[in-house]
Image (cartoon, coloured by chain):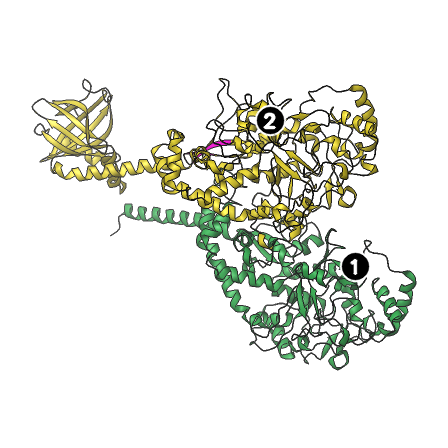
Amino acid sequence: MSGEELDRLFRESPPGPLPDGEATGTAIVFPGGWLARVKAWAMRWFLWQGKVFDATTGTLVNRVTPFGIRAIKARYGPGESWFDGKPCTVLDYSETSMLARCVRDEIRQVAPGLYLGQVFVGRKRLLRFAVSFQYEPARTFWRRLLAGAALLAVLFGLYLLVRMNSDAPVRHADAAEHFKYGSTGGERTSGIPLAIWHAMPALFEDLLPDRTYRPERPYASFGFLYETDDDGSFRELPIGVSRRRVQGLDRVFVNCAICHAGTVRDTPAGPRRIVLGMPSNTVDLQAFERFLFEAAADERFHPARVMAAIEQVGADDDLDWLNNRMLKKVGVHLMRDQLLMLRDRFGFMDREPDAGPGRVDTFNPPKVLLNFPMDQLPEREWVGNCDLPSIWMQGAKEGMQLHWDGNNTKVSERNRSAAFGTGAYPPSLDRPAMQRIEDWLHDLEPPPYPYPIDRELAARGKTLYAQYCADCHGADGRDFSGAKVGTVEPLESIGTDRRRLDSYTLSLAVNQNQLYAAYPDERFRHFRKTHGYANLPLDGVWLRAPYLHNGSVPTLRDLLEPAAQRPATFFRGYDVFDPVKVGFVADVGIEPAESAEAHPQLVGKRYFAVDTRERPGADPRQRNWGNGNQGHEGPAYGTELPAADKDAIVEFLKTF
Amino acid sequence: MKTPAKKRRLLIALGVLLVLGAILGGIAWQKLFRVHPQDPEVLASAEMKFKYGSLGAENDRGLPYLVWMVLPRIFPEMMPGPGGYQSFGLAWEEGQEVPVGFARKTVGFPRLTNNCALCHTATWRSGEDAPVHVVPAGPGHTTGVQDMIRFLSRAAADPRFNADTILREIDLVSSDAWGNEGLSWLDRLIYRFGIIPMTRKALIEQQDAFAWMNRPGKPHWGPGRDDPMNLTKYFMTQMPEDDTVGQADFPSVWNLGVRSGTDARGEPLLLNWSGDTPAVRSVLIDSALGLGAPAEDWFLDEMAELDRWLSELPPPPWPDEFPPPDPALVSAGEAVFAQHCAVCHEPGRERTNKVIPIEEIGTDPERMRSWSAAAARHANERVREMGIDRPPMTQDRDPYGYVAPPLDGLWLRAPYLHNGSIPNLVEFLKPPEQRVKRFHRGHDVYDPEQVGFVSDARAEAAGAFLLDTTERGNGNGGHPFGTTLPDPDKHALIEYLKTR
C-alpha cells in the first residue's frame, strides 16, 4: 500500500477499543515498494518490536533493541487526532519519557486486533506504524534470542575487524627518541609478542650468554642498552627495540638503533655515555639471534610453559582475554615455527667465525631473504662478518660508494636495504617513520672528542694527515673533500681481508633489484659488485673502533703499525676508552670488579676475543676466516713513519 | 498484463544490470587486459629495446611477473645454484630489474616475456675478480634455456605451486596491507582464482609440449645452445615428432649486413647453421614467432627496425683488457688467412655464407639432419597462413652441409663449430682427433691465450656444464682446414683472428 492509501485507511477507521496487552509493532518508513518488507524486518529485529499496553494504568512501554527491552513509557487514552481532528487513541510520551518527550503517536483500529498508527515529532508527522495483537508474543522469544545473537556476532565481527586492522606504533615526539625506540614497521610482519619478549629471558635463562636473568634489564646479557626514566626506573625496552600494536597485540622488534647506538666509559666505574649514530660496540646481535633460535628449538618453547613464564614475569597484565587465548592457542606455535624456519635458513652462520659484539654478516642474510640455496654457496662467499658502521652526517655522504665495499651510491637505497634487518619488508616498511630517521641522520654530527688534545701535536699531525690520508679520507672530520673519498680502492692496493668483499656477489646485486620491484620509485637500481673496499670519511673516527671493515685492529695507533705489529688477538665489546691509542681498551677480557656497583649488569661479563690469525681446522667457526688484520699498510698508508709522526696523526684524528 | 509500474521496474533492473556489467567489464579490462606501454627507459634506444623490449607475446607466452619473480624463492632446491634466475647463466645487468632478454610489460597485470636478447647476448670477464661485460647480439653462451624451461615445468608440477604459497611470498614483495601501495584484495583474488591456477595449467601444458626434448637419448643442450630446428618443427609447424637431435650454438647476430643479400652471381647468402633460410628478415621473424610474437603489422615494423639495427651493429673488437695482438704476427696471420681461410670466411668471397657440403666439411651431421625440405614447406605454409609475407625458407632440397660464416667478432663466438664442440681457437686448429673430447662450457671468464672461454677445472669449479663430444650431435670432428699448418702459422693465424 502506498502512503496515501494508508492515510486514507487511517482517516476512515474508527478509534476502536483501548488496546490492552502485548502487541507486535511494524514501522512503516517509506511505504510501498519491494523494499518495505526488508525495512520492516530490519526495524523489528534491531530497533523496535512492539508495545506493551496496560489498560488498567493507561500506560504503555515499547519493546526496543533486539532483546525486546521494555523502555520508553507513554500514557495513552482517547483523544483528538492531530491528523484529522477526529477521535483516536493518543499515545503521549511528553510526560513520561526523557528520550521521546516530543513524540506523540495516534492509533486507530483498522481490523480486529490490528491498529494503524501515526508518529508525530513536534507537530510534524514522521512515519506510520502498525501494532498487532494477532500474534502470540511467546513466539518472539526465539526470534529475540536469535536476533540478539546475530547482533552480537555482527558487533563482535566489527570489533575484530577494527582490532585486527589496528596498527599503532608507540610514537615519540623527539627525533632522537624515535631513532632509539621508534618503529620502522618491522613488527608488522616480524614482531615478537611483547609478553613473550618479556618471558623468554626468564624461561630460557640458561640460554643467555651469561646465564643470568635480570628482571629489570633482561636483554642486557646481549649488550643491549637500557636507559632509565626520569624517576630512575629502567625503561621497559632497550635502545634499538621498538613497540607497535598490530592486530590488537603489542609486538616488538629491533630498529636501526640496535646496530647504531653505542656507549663510552672513561673508567670502569664511570657512567656509560650513550652515543647515537656510533657503531653498537656492545651489542652482540648474533648471540641474540642464536638465543631466539635455540629457545625455539627447546622443548620449553611450548604454550603452557611460555604462558606460565609470561605470568611469572607479570607480562600477562597487558594481555586481554583474547590475546591471552590467541597466544596460547596459536601465537606461541606460530612464533616457534617462524623461528625454526629462520634458524634453518640462518644455518650459514655456523660456517663462519662468531661475529661477536659490534659485528654482523651484512650480505649473507639478503641471500637468505631471497632464499638462495645456501648449501650450494661457494666457500669464498661464506664469511661476511664486518664491523657495524657509524651513520652520522648522511647528507654529506650522498653519492659516495656506501657500505664497506662501496656497493651502493644511494643513501635511501642503502637505508631501505638495511631496513630488512629491522624486519621491514617493502609492503610493511613504515615509510614516514623511516623518512624521519633519514632526515635526522642527514645532519647528525658525532660528539666532539671529550678528552684533552695536544693542539701542537695535532697541528703537526694535520700536515702528515694531509700528505698521507686526506686524498682518501677527506680533509678533516667534517670536510670530506679528497680525490678518492667515497670511492672504492681496489683490493690489490688496499690489501685488507677479502672475505667480506667476496661475500657480496654480482648475482646478489642483480637480485636485490627485485626486492622493491613492486614499488617502482623505490626499486633498487644502484647496487654494484665492486672489487675493493671504499675509502670512508672519518667523522667521529675516535668512536668507530675497532678499525678496518672487519674490526680487526683495536685502535688507531695500532692501525698505523704494519700488520705484523698489530695485536694478533684482542678483546672487543668493552666500552672503556683508551685515549692514548684511541679506541676501546682491548686487553680486558672480563669486566673488572671495580665497576660492580656502578654497573651491576656487567659483573663478570666476558668480552669477545678476536683472533685475527687464520687457522686450519674442520670447524669453520674456529678458522677465523674474515678476521685478518692485514692491509692498509706500507709507505703510502703511513705505517712506516717514525713513531712520533704516527702519534701526531692519531692526535689530529682526535679532532674529527 | 504488465502494468506501467512493472515495466518501469523491469527497465530499472535492466539498467542497473547494464551499469553493473559495465563496471565489472571495466574492472576486468583494467585488471587483465589494459595495455600499458613499457618503461620509457626500455624504449629509449634500439639497444635497450633489443635487451628489454617486448615482442608482444604477452597473451601467448607471458608469465605473471610477480609469480615468476618469487618462484626461485619457493623452489630453491630446483635452482642450479644461488643467485635466482641469474644462476641459469642469464646476462643480468647491474641496476636492471630483470635479466637481459626479458621484457616486463603490464597487460592488465605485469607480465614477462622473452625476446631475442635472451639467447643473443654474450657476457665475458677477464678474470674471476673482474667486472662482467654484457655484449648485446653476442652468442648467449652461458644461457641455460633448457634448464630454465625444465625449472618452470618442475615448479608447476610441484604441490607448492599453489595460491597460498605463492601469495605468501608475493606478500613480502607487494601488498597494500599497511597502507603502502601494492596488490589489493581484489588483485589477490584475481591472482588466487585466476592468474596462479592458469599459469600453473599453462606451464604444465608447456611441459607436455617439450616432452620430446626430455626423451632418452636426447643430449642436454647445456648453456649456450638449443635445438632450433626441432623447436621450429614442433612449435611452429606441428610436425610429428621424429628421432633427430639438433642442438646448436646460439650464433652472434651483430653485423648482419655482411650476411644478407646476394653474392656476385645473384645467389642469396644463406643463414642458419645449415643454410635453411635465405634472408635475415625471415630468420628474425621466424625466431620471434617462436617466442610467441603475434603476427601483426607493428610486429613486422619492429622486425624491420631490428633488422636495420643488427645489420649495422659492429662486432666487438678485441678488448683492451687483454694484451693487444702483436702487429707483426697479425700481418703474418693475415697472409695465412688469405691463403687458407678467406675463400670461405671473407665476406664477399665465393663460398662465404654458402653451404659447404657435409662430405667436405665433415662436421657432426645431426643438426643438419634435424631439418628437411618438407619441414621448410610446412613452415613456409604456416607463416603464410599467419598472413606474413617474408622470403620463404629453402624448400627445394634437404640440408646437405653447413654454412661457412664470416668471422666477425670471432673471439667472443667461442665455443666453436655449429654445435659449440670446440672450446677455443687453439683447440680448433688441432687435427680433429687431437681436439679435447670433454670440456666445460658456460663459464664467462675469458682466456686470451687460447682465445675462448676458460673450459678446464676452473670452469668446472664454477659449476660450468660438462660437454661430452662423444654424445650424439656433440661430435667435434671435421673442419680439417688449417689443422695441418705449421705451428708458427697457426700462432700467427690465431693472432690475426683476434682482430676479426
**A462 horizontally vs A273: left or right:** right
C-alpha span from label 2 to label 1: 72 Å
Of all residues, the one furthest to the right in this rendering is: B328
Q: Which residue is rendered at x = 16% and y = 30% of the image?
A: A51
Q: Position of residue A529 (x, y in %)?
A: 69, 47
Any idea which chain is the green one in this picture? B
Q: Which mark is residue A592?
A: 2
Main structural element of the magenta stretch: helix, strand or loop? strand
Is A246 included in the stretch rendered in magenta? yes
Q: Which residue is rendered at x = 59% and y = 75% of the image?
A: B217
Is B279 included in the stretch rendered in magenta? no
**A185 horizontally vs A476: left or right:** left
Label 1 amino acid? Pro
Q: Position of residue B225 (x, y in %)?
A: 66, 66
Residue A46 seen in render: yes
Label 2 amino acid? Pro
Residue B54 seen in render: no
Q: Position of residue A162 (x, y in %)?
A: 39, 35
Magenta range is A242-251
State the SS at label 1.
Answer: loop
Q: Quadrant of residue A41?
A: top left
Label 2 Cα crowd, 10 Å radius (few <14 / some 14-19 / many 20+): some
| Residue hosting label 1 | B314
Observer-nearest of A296 and A613: A613
Observer-nearest of A182 and A168: A182
- Which one is in front in this view, the residue at disc 2 or the one at disc 1? 2
